[in-house]
Image: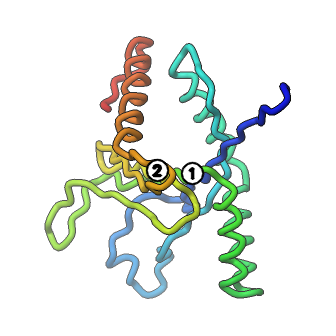
């Protein structure tokens, strides 16, 4: 490597649903005495390597990300980190667990949420919801990306530190353009019909 050049290393944290069953439970079933339905979040994280390199085939990014994520999902990484944080919290308290979590998130570039939303429509007090989205704030990263699926839609939500990324609208436009390029490449190869 040439003198003065540093190797750029980008990593992200990816939220992973640790529940074996991802369907939405009816609230009445969850409230029944002796119910096996679990309340609250059961989400782990994995460290995901990011690469910045020009590819001739835009689908190469998708293939590489899918391959890496498939390996991460079958690994014990998310479950072990979840268990470790929970154990540290019980033994040493919330502050120690908070320090571990801050260290993990502080050594990554961005957070990406891949937790699936509901596949069937949800209503609140008999009012159907048109979409569901999520966000988080207060983390040490300058960029948090949430892709939330809801029925047949995907909602993209960005949380951005504008002192680091001064034009989040340009970032959104670039993201939409990249997804359009990937969609076009997939359609040209006849992968399947998808909407962006």
Q: CA distance from mark 2 to mark 1?
A: 8 Å
Which residue shows up at 48% across the image and 85% down it? 34
Which residue shows up at 41% across the image and 61% down it? 135
**Horizontal placement of 148 versus 93: left or right?**
left
On the rendered image, what quadrant is the C terminus found in? top left
Residue 89, image x, y percentages:
70, 82
Task: Give the answer, above or below, for where 169 lies relative to 53.
Answer: below
Q: Residues within 10 Å of mark 1 (few under 14, many from 20)?
A: many
Looking at the picture, the colour scheme in use is rainbow
**Residue at mark 2:** 145
Task: Give the answer, above or below, for where 135 lies relative to 84.
Answer: above
Which residue shows up at 30% across the image and 31% down it? 195
Which residue shows up at 59% across the image and 35% down it? 65
On residue 110, which mark appears?
1
Dot 1 falls on a residue whose secondary structure is strand
**Horizontal placement of 98 versus 183: left or right?**
right
Q: Nearer the viewer, residue 85 or 163?
A: 163
Whether pointer 2 and pointer 1 mark residues with C-beta atoms closer than 8 Å, the reply is: yes
Residue 41, image x, y percentages:
50, 70
On the rendered image, what quadrant is the N terminus found in? top right
Tell me the quarter of the picture where residue 28 sits.
bottom left
């Amino acid at each position: 490597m040439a003198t003065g050049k540093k190797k750029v290393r980008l990593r992200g944290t990816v939220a992973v649903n640790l529940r074996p069953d991802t369907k939405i439970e009816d609230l009445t079933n969850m409230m029944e005495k002796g119910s096996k339905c679990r309340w609250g979040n059961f989400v782990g994280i994995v460290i995901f390597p990011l690469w910045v390199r020009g590819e001739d085939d835009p689908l190469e990014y998708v293939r590489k990300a899918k391959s890496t994520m498939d390996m991460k999902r079958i690994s014990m990484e998310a479950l072990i980190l979840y268990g470790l944080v929970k154990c540290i919290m019980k033994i040493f308290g919330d502050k120690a667990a908070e320090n571990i979590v801050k260290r993990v998130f502080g050594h990554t570039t961005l957070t990406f949420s891949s937790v699936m939303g509901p596949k069937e429509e949800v209503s609140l007090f008999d009012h159907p919801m048109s979409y569901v989205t999520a966000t988080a704030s207060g983390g040490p990263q300058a960029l948090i990306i949430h892709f939330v699926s809801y029925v047949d839609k995907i909602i993209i939500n960005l949380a951005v530190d504008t002192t680091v990324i001064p034009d989040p609208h340009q970032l959104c436009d670039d993201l939409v353009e990249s997804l359009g390029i990937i969609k076009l490449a997939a359609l040209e190869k006849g992968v399947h019909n998808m909407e962006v």
